[in-house]
Amino acid sequence: MSALLQPGGMLIILVPALKKIYGSMDISFEHYRRYEKKELKSLIQGHNLEILNFYYMNFLGLLGWFFNGRILNKKDLPENQTKLFDKLVPFLRLAEKIIRPPLGQSLILIAQKKAK
């Protein structure tokens, strides 16, 4: 991806986080893996990219994903939980902007291609 970027171009990566929560829902959603923060950072290094922002997101989703996918071995998100979560998203998004969670269901990495 770095080779396709012009100098100053931006790369935004959103991936499933935390290998320990990989379960039946990941398989159902065709996630082949989950990433650890250190692992994703090492994949970016050495590709002429400067990491501008790198953080976990969706702490509450992490709990639901783990419970449904690892404990209950469900293949899909329960509809009632999804509807409740959708109602909470605006509040959760604001809360995570104020305080970045220490863990989350996803990792987001924003990098910029360095000038040569």
Image: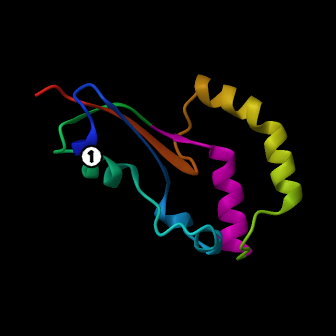
Left or right: residue 86 versus residue 56 is right
93 relative position to 80: left or right:
left
Outermost residue, left direction?
Answer: 116
Q: Amino acid at mark 1?
A: Ile
Q: Position of residue 58 (x, y in %)?
A: 62, 43
Dot 1 alpha-carbon crowd within 10 angstroms: few under 14, some 14 to 19, many 20 or more? some
Q: Nearer the viewer, residue 80 or 115?
A: 115
- Residue 62 is a magenta residue: yes
Q: Quadrant of the C terminus?
A: top left
Given residues 104 and 28, the one toward you in this image is: 28
Whole-percent x and y of residue 35? 42, 57
**Image position of 52 (left or right of 82):** left
Q: Residue at x 26, y 25 (%)?
A: 8
Looking at the picture, tell me which residue is in the foreground, 97 or 31. 31
The residue that mark 1 highlights is: 44
Q: Residue at x 16, y 25 (%)?
A: 115
In the displayed structure image, the side of residue 36 where residue 58 appears, left or right: right
User: Residue 96 or 30: which is nearer the viewer?
Assistant: 30
- Of helix, strand and loop, which mostly describes the magenta segment? helix
Bounds of the magenta span? 55-72
Q: Position of residue 92 (x, y in %)?
A: 71, 34
* Vertical arrangement, residue 15 with respect to residue 24, above or below: above
In which quadrant of the rendered view does residue 36 lie? bottom left
Say which element carries label 1.
helix
In the displayed structure, would residue 115 be above or below residue 4?
above
75 is within the stretch colored magenta: no
